[in-house]
Amino acid sequence: MSHDSGPPAPPLTLAEVEATARAAHAGQTDKAGRPYAGHLRAVAEGVRRRGGDDEQIAAAWLHDAVEDDALTERWLEEAPLSRRTKDIVLALTKRAGEPPEAYAARILATPGALLVKEADLAHNADPARLAVLDEATRTRLTEKYTRMRALLGRAGRE
């Protein structure tokens, strides 16, 4: 016998997804010490500018939540979000010890994920954002982002 409590909840709106992501990452900062929500907003805007749809924009807001332990994988699975949004978030969630090649292959195999990752990489590699970091960190991150773009078949593109 089913323990279903009526119809499924309506999907979260983008405003609700944004509020959830901001709350989940509250108190977190990026490598430059800025509030982490600024990165999420930039990635969501980057997805929008690249022609991404609402499911991809929702995934952009949540793209680091599971990886950063801001939200659990169980929360994501149970959340009233589309399967596609959930799959994109899971594709972008790096796993401990995972080779970059496997991570890139999962992104490429997941419909809608590449555009979100491109927006993420573009913001991460923003020269203004990197400029505030020390030279060793800047060099390491630039090499990391360049390698990931190459693995995603996006070498030379923004």
Image (tube, rainbow, N blue to C red):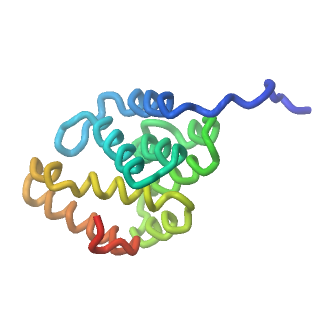
In the rendered image, the residue lying farthest to the top is: 5
Q: Is residue 119 left or right of residue 32?
A: right
Q: Is residue 54 left or right of residue 100?
A: right
The mark total stands at 0
Q: Is residue 78 left or right of residue 102?
A: right
Q: Is residue 10 above or below residue 125?
A: above
Q: Residue visible at 44% across and 27% down? A: 19
Q: Is residue 139 left or right of residue 63?
A: left
Quarter of the image with the N terminus is top right
Q: Position of residue 137 (x, y in %)?
A: 15, 57
Quarter of the image with the C terminus is bottom left
Q: Is residue 3 above or below residue 91?
A: above
Q: Residue visible at 50% across and 68% down? A: 108
In the rendered image, the residue lying farthest to the left is: 135
Q: Residue visible at 52% across and 39% down? A: 72
Q: Position of residue 116 (x, y in %)?
A: 43, 54
Q: Position of residue 142 (x, y in %)?
A: 20, 63
Q: Position of residue 93 (x, y in %)?
A: 46, 53
Q: Residue visible at 46% across and 44% down? A: 57
